[in-house]
Amino acid sequence: MTRAWLFPVLFLLCGSAVATELFFQGSPGTAAGFLLVFVLLAAVNSPLIFPRSISAQEARRRSTVDGRPVVYWRPGCTYCLRLRVRLGHRARQLHWVDIWRDPAGAALVREVNDGNETVPTVVVAGRPHTNPDPAWVREQLSSSA
């Protein structure tokens, strides 16, 4: 849990330090701008913009029932963020597993990626796909519905 919030907290601390320095140098407008940028960076890198994660076991069970893909991800991953943003509101239809919170999910990702925790790894109909194109994931979601 702590690792998931490491980047957002660092962004907030750094942004606050830079903004404080700029404020005391007499640039309150620039300080506010910098703080806003760092707050946005913290929000984008936080687990809050991703759908609620479930366990790998639960994701597999749900995927078997409804046929929807399972996405293995981790906070701070730019490729995971790209997938999430490009899927838009449809991302909530997928089953998301945070590999930093679920050891079984991390083990599965390592197993299918030659020992590496390469994410996003999307499992569709039991077949893993590492860092797939978001358009392809949308197609898989449409065909499972």
Image (cartoon, helix red, strand yellow):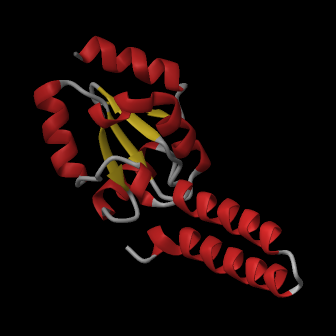
> Left or right: where does residue 72 sit relative to residue 69?
right
Q: Is residue 41 shown to the viewer in this render?
A: yes
> In the image, what residue occupies the spot 79% across and 67% down?
29
Number of numbered callouts drawn? 0
- Quarter containing the C terminus: top left
Judge left or right: residue 145 versus residue 114. Answer: left
Q: Nearer the viewer, residue 145 or 107?
A: 145
- Nearer-the-camera pick, 87 or 19: 19
Question: Residue at 27% across / 25% down in the picture?
Answer: 125
Q: Position of residue 80 (x, y in %)?
A: 52, 44
Q: Quadrant of residue 129?
A: top left
Q: Is 59 located above or below residue 136 in the figure?
A: below
Left/right placement of residue 33 relative to residue 71 reads right
Outermost residue toward the left in this view: 65
Closer-to-camera residue (115/25): 25
| Residue 82, horizontal then vertical, whole percent | 57, 38
Is 72 situated above or below 65? below
Query: Quadrant where the N terminus lies?
Result: bottom left
| Observer able to see residue 128 | no
Residue found at x 16% / y 48%? 58
Q: Residue furthest bottom?
A: 24
Q: Position of residue 10 (x, y in %)?
A: 62, 76
Above or below, comparing residue 81 to residue 15 in the picture: above
Q: Residue at x 39, y 58 (%)?
A: 99
Residue 18 at what x, y percent from top left? 78, 78
Residue 67, located in which quarter of the rendered image?
top left
